[in-house]
Image (cartoon, rainbow, N blue to C red):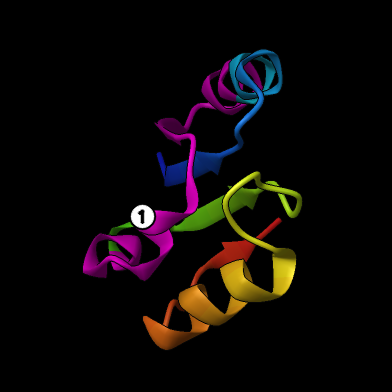
C-alpha cells in the first residue's frame, strides 16, 4: 500500500536523495523546505514524516512540539 510521506529538509540535495528513496520504496513523497507546514492541519494527511532536526527556521524541539500540537499519529523519522 502506497503511503504519503512528508519529506521536510532545508537542504535541497538531501531532499532530492530522500524523495528518490521514498519513491523507490513505492510511496508518495511530498516535499517541504521549512517548518510552518508542521503547524498546519495538513500534517494529519501524512502517514510518516522524514524530519530534518536542524532546520534553519526551527529547532528540533520546536518542530516536534508543532507536530504534537496537531495530534499527528504517524511515524517520525
Q: Check disc 1: other Cα within 10 Å, few if <14, some if 14-19, many if 20+.
A: some
Q: Residue at x 52, y 56 (%)?
A: 48
Q: Is residue 23 left or right of residue 45?
A: right
Q: Is residue 69 above or below residue 51?
A: below
**In the image, is residue 61 part of the stretch drawn in magenta?**
no
Q: Quadrant of the N terminus?
A: top left
**In the image, is residue 35 part of the stretch drawn in magenta?**
yes
In the rendered image, which quarter is residue 38 located in? Answer: bottom left
Assign a secondary structure to mark 1.
Answer: helix
Q: Residue at x 70, y 46 (%)?
A: 52
Write down the residue under mark 1: 37
Tell me which segment is drawn in magenta: 19-44
Q: Who is closer to the viewer here, 70 or 46?
A: 70
The extreme front residue here reads 57
Q: Position of residue 29 (x, y in %)?
A: 44, 32
Q: Residue at x 42, y 86 (%)?
A: 69
Q: Is residue 42 above or below residue 54?
A: below
Q: Position of residue 16 (x, y in %)?
A: 60, 14
Q: Who is closer to the viewer here, 37 or 72?
A: 37
Amino acid at each position: 500500500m502506497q503511503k504519503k510521506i512528508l519529506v521536510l529538509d532545508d537542504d535541497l540535495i538531501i531532499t532530492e536523495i530522500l524523495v528518490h528513496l521514498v519513491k523507490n520504496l513505492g510511496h508518495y513523497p511530498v516535499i517541504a523546505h521549512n517548518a510552518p507546514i508542521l503547524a498546519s492541519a495538513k500534517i494529519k494527511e501524512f502517514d510518516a514524516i522524514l524530519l530534518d532536526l536542524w532546520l534553519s527556521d526551527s529547532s528540533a524541539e520546536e518542530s516536534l512540539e508543532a507536530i504534537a500540537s496537531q495530534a499527528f499519529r504517524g511515524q517520525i523519522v
